[in-house]
Image: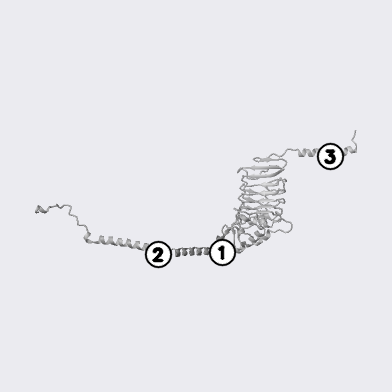
Amino acid sequence: MAPHAGQRGLWSPLPGLLLLAAALSRPAAPCPFQCYCFGSPRLLLRCASGAELRQPPRDVPPDARNLTIVGANLTVLRAAAFAGGDEGATDGVRLPLLTALRLTHNNIEVVEDGAFDGLPSLAALDLSHNPLRALGSRAFRGLPALRSLKLNHALARGSPGMLDALDAALAPLAELRLLGLAGNALSRLPPAALRLPRLEQLDARVNALAGLGPDELRALERDGDLPQPRLLLADNPLSCGCTSRPLLVWLHNATERVPDARRLRCASPRVLLDRPLMDLDEARLGCSDGDAHESREGIDVAGPELEASYVFFGLVLALIGLIFLMVLYLNRRGIQRWMRNLREACRDQMEGYHYRYEQDADPRRAPAPAAPAGSRATSPGSGL
């Protein structure tokens, strides 16, 4: 009996549902060699490889969400290193669901332009603890979803143009929230990093920053509803001169934006060495002509606090001297008697020395000469 029209409408979706179930039940892709796969459907991979791994594994399952490669010898991340197709292809998307990529301690020295092409969902990238020497100015292109980028302890060995390349590479990352630049010996921060519109935290600890200028501080300000970024600055050799006045004022007005503000300490000038920057008064920071040519900063050594310490020290010395004089005055008779006794004792001692000298110099008290050793002793009555 042929089914009526209502029955045809009821049974028509069944083939599509069966095909969908077959697609969802297909076996997962095998785990790459020397890698460990965890979890489903959010697949996590960890590849703890040795020096033989010189490029990212090409057989990563397409449904991978988190990929970690540690301890390899990648050296160079070429263009489209994680994209599909040939090594030089840049249009393929082999890992469309990958959201976190960790590549720490892999001896990476070069990151070419487009090295992360084909990762449209990537939100977190960690390249920390790699001896980067060259970074492409378009190394981070094609990462519209990137929220976190960590380059801690990775740029200290870079070429002279590394900072400019980093500045160009950061410019297109409009959605970046977290940027880690700690431990890179940076003498200044990349301007593009300060202008990222949605940046929430910039980690610049353990660098070579002498301070932040007015232009850099203005670049950290955001208008409207955009978040005000937090800044980590501890363990930088801050120069506490007149050029640090804008930074000190900014810290007092926005202390909550610098969580480690109390750990900021002066590295120069010498009189303020290791002094907390937040404990200084703006009047303490001055410029001197001798330091203007070298470091453009100085210290006004005649500040109010230093003058007060000198005055207090002088008063203490004056009080000690007054007490000493009073003790001498109250014991003047005893001191006179002690001096007289000392003088008499010295005179008696000298007289004794003089008497013994006179006795020793009297010729009558000289001893008789001794008889020759070969002579005979004779008696008075011998007649000889």
Disc on res. 308: 1
Task: Write the residue at 26% across / 62% down.
Answer: 358
Residue 379 image position (x, y, % from top left) = 12, 52
Q: Could you tell me if the residues under marks 1 and 2 are in contact, i.e. CB atoms within 8 Å?
A: no
Residue identifier under label 2: 336
Alpha carbon separation for disc pair 2 and 3: 126 Å
Image vertical order of residue 45 relative to residue 382, above or below = above
Residue at x 39%, y 63% (from the top left corner)? 337
Q: Nearer the viewer, mark 2 or mark 3?
A: 2
Give the left or right position of residue 359, taking residue 249 as reference.
left
Q: Nearer the viewer, mark 1 or mark 2?
A: 2
- The Cα atoms of the two marked residues, 1 and 2, are separated by 41 Å
Q: Position of residue 332 (x, y in %)?
A: 43, 64
First of labels 1, 2 by sequence position: 1
Which amino acid is tagged 1? Ala
Between 279 and 1, the one lying in front of the other is 279
Q: Residue at x 68, y 49 (%)?
A: 124
Local crowd size for mark 2, using a 10 Å CA cut-off: few (<14), some (14–19), many (≥20): few
Mark number for residue 13? Answer: 3
- In the image, residue 106 above or below residue 337: above
How many neighbours does mark 3 have within 10 angstroms: few (below 14), some (14-19), or many (20 or more)? few
